[in-house]
Image: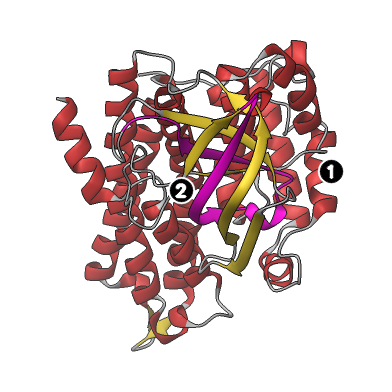
Amino acid sequence: MDFSFTEEQTLLRNSVQKFVSSAYDFDTRRSIITSEGGWRPAYWQQFAELGLLGAAIPEDFGGLGGNAVDTMVVMEEFGRGLVVEPYLGTVVIGAGLLAAAGSTAQKEELLPQIAGGELVTALAYAEPQGRFNLADLTTTAKAQGGDYVLNGHKAVVIGAPWAHKLIISARTAGSQREAKGVTLFLVDATAPGVSLRSYPTVDGLRAAEVTLENVKVPASAVIGAVDGGLASLEMIADRAIAALAAEAIGAMKVLNDTTVDYCKTRKQFGVPIGKFQVLQHRMVDMFMAYEQSVSIAYMVTLKLDESSEERAKAASAAKVQIGKAGRYIGQQAVQLHGGMGMTDELKVGHYFKRLTMIDAQFGNVDHHLKRYAQLT
């Protein structure tokens, strides 16, 4: 299949590449993730000025009217630089969910803020008992007059320490794992009753445990239909998986290139170790795993606008391939670098950590193998 990028998408890729190469080198990233805030708001504003935050937002709401391929281009380049700023949680998930299911008032108010770099969002969907079941919720939202009162606990909310608003899934009807009865709410991160316990994750991002105690929100905070939020949540999870697949192939590309370069210069027995056939075979296998991942990342991106079943199958297939390939490429890169591959000073381990976390986000390999089997 001939997959050619448009001139605009090529220019978008070039602008992101230029930023990552000039402002997001490995040492700069290390200083960012070890800083108190864990990210650089100034870079976030640069993303807004470059048009990255509004690339996939409709033009009617302050964006550039792009599509999923534009998002894929940005995420792949961010994967090469291990960019930690919350593009996935805010632009892919937050703006994507609002554009698809939000009210006109929500779109008019919030989407221009996201495009302008003024609003950061985080999706609080996971709970300790839920594993990867999006409908397994103990967080509740009870109607009270014209408002809702939320109570519960959300686990490992990526980007929550930076977020102005949290998108929270809560049960408004039905039993704990029932598909019907899930509703999505937009909640201020500083609202009374919202408490965050923040911490760094193994891959350099920031997350938080979010506790909700009698948090009151108006009915206008509901995203989409009351009791019908699961379909929107599944849709945005599949879109997030496609974006993560693009980020992963960017990281895999760096690991492959770094490993090949190292094997050309590291000598053993007087010759570069890249001359040894057994290591050449391993690097070829790494390259094949990467190319297969590129193909499936493109495939899932192109299927995001198809039926919910086809979209879900594509997302699960991509998650399985990306998870397996990421683990294999990461392990081989570390091993071929020898003992130094385990050190914090070498970027190889940082890319492997990020690929490991990507495998765990929105369901790991085992979960998506089962999901794919159920859909076929």
For marks 1 and 2, give the one nearer the viewer. 1
The residue sitting at the bottom extreme is: 269
Q: Earlier in the sequence, mark 1 or mark 2?
A: 1
The residue sitting at the front extreme is: 145
Which SS class for mark 1? helix
Please tell me the numbered disc located at residue 45: 1
Looking at the rendered structure, the kind of residue marked 2 is Ala
Query: x, y percentage for residue 218?
Result: 68, 29
Please determine whether, in this image, residue 62 is positioned above or below residue 213: above
Please determine whether, in this image, residue 172 is positioned above or below residue 45: above
Query: x, y percentage for residue 123?
Result: 56, 42
Quarter the N terminus occupies: top left
- Which residue is at the front of the view, 101 or 10? 101
- Scheme of colours in the image: secondary structure
Left or right, residue 7 beside residue 211 = right
Looking at the rendered structure, the kind of residue marked 1 is Gln
Magenta residues? 145-174
Residue 277 in view (yes/no): yes
Please tell me the numbered disc located at residue 129: none
- Tell me if residue 288 is in the magenta stretch: no
Other residues around mark 1 within 10 Å, as few (<14) / some (14–19) / many (≥20): some
Residue 84 in view (yes/no): no
- Which residue lies under the disc numbered 2? 248
- Which residue is at the front of the view, 365 or 182? 182
